[in-house]
């Protein structure tokens, strides 16, 4: 009575979307933390370098996440159609 079956592909899709959403939130948190560290470094080169490294790594991670999502979306469309 009103119960609908969900395909395996839809369940995997929801899991992947949730996981990518969590990774996006982690990216934003890393950028905020690194920005805060950079702003409070008060001229200390070591802290500024650490903040730049964190930002650089977070951006690389975001590029990998977006690439993985694009590949997954392409494969999901091909499998579902």
Image: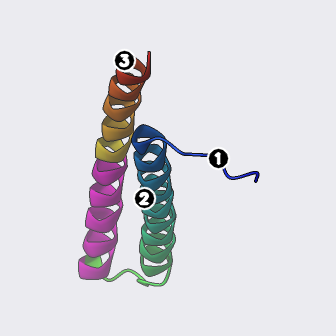
Question: Viewed as shown, does residue 30 lie left or right of 3?
Answer: left
Which residue is under mark 2?
A: 19
Q: Residue at x 32, y 25 (%)?
A: 75
Q: Residues within 10 Å of mark 3 (few under 14, many from 20)?
A: few
In percent of width and height, residue 32 lies at 51, 71
Q: Residue at x 44, y 53 (%)?
A: 20
**Taken as a whole, is the magenta stretch helix, strand or loop?**
helix
Nearer to the camera, 71 or 51: 71
- Quarter of the C terminus within the rendering: top left
Work out how far the residue at label 1 is from the one at label 2, CA to CA, in angstroms.
Answer: 24 Å
Q: Residues within 10 Å of mark 2 (few under 14, many from 20)?
A: few
Give the secondary structure at mark 2: helix
Give the secondary structure at mark 3: helix
Is the residue 31 above or below the residue 60 in the image?
Answer: below
Q: Residue at x 26, y 70 (%)?
A: 49
The magenta segment is 46-62
* Residue 51 inside the magenta-drawn segment: yes
In percent of width and height, residue 50 lies at 26, 74
User: Which mark is in front, 3 or 1?
Assistant: 1
In percent of width and height, residue 11 lies at 46, 49
Which residue is under mark 1?
A: 4
Q: Is the C-beta separation of discs 1 and 2 under 8 Å? A: no
Instruction: Name, please, the residue furthest toward the right.
Output: 2
Q: Earlier in the sequence, mark 1 or mark 2?
A: 1
Question: Viewed as shown, does residue 49 lie left or right of 25?
Answer: left
Which residue is under mark 3?
A: 78
Q: Earlier in the sequence, mark 3 or mark 1?
A: 1
Q: Residues within 10 Å of mark 1 (few under 14, many from 20)?
A: few
In percent of width and height, residue 62 lies at 37, 49
* Residue 58 inside the magenta-drawn segment: yes
């Amino acid at each position: 009575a009103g119960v609908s079956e969900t395909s395996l592909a839809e369940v995997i899709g929801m899991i992947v979307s949730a996981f990518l959403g969590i990774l996006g939130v982690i990216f934003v948190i890393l950028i905020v933390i690194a920005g805060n560290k950079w702003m409070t470094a008060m001229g200390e080169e070591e802290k500024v370098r650490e903040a730049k490294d964190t930002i650089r790594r977070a951006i690389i991670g975001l590029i990998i996440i977006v690439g993985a999502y694009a590949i997954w979306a392409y494969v999901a469309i091909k499998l579902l159609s």
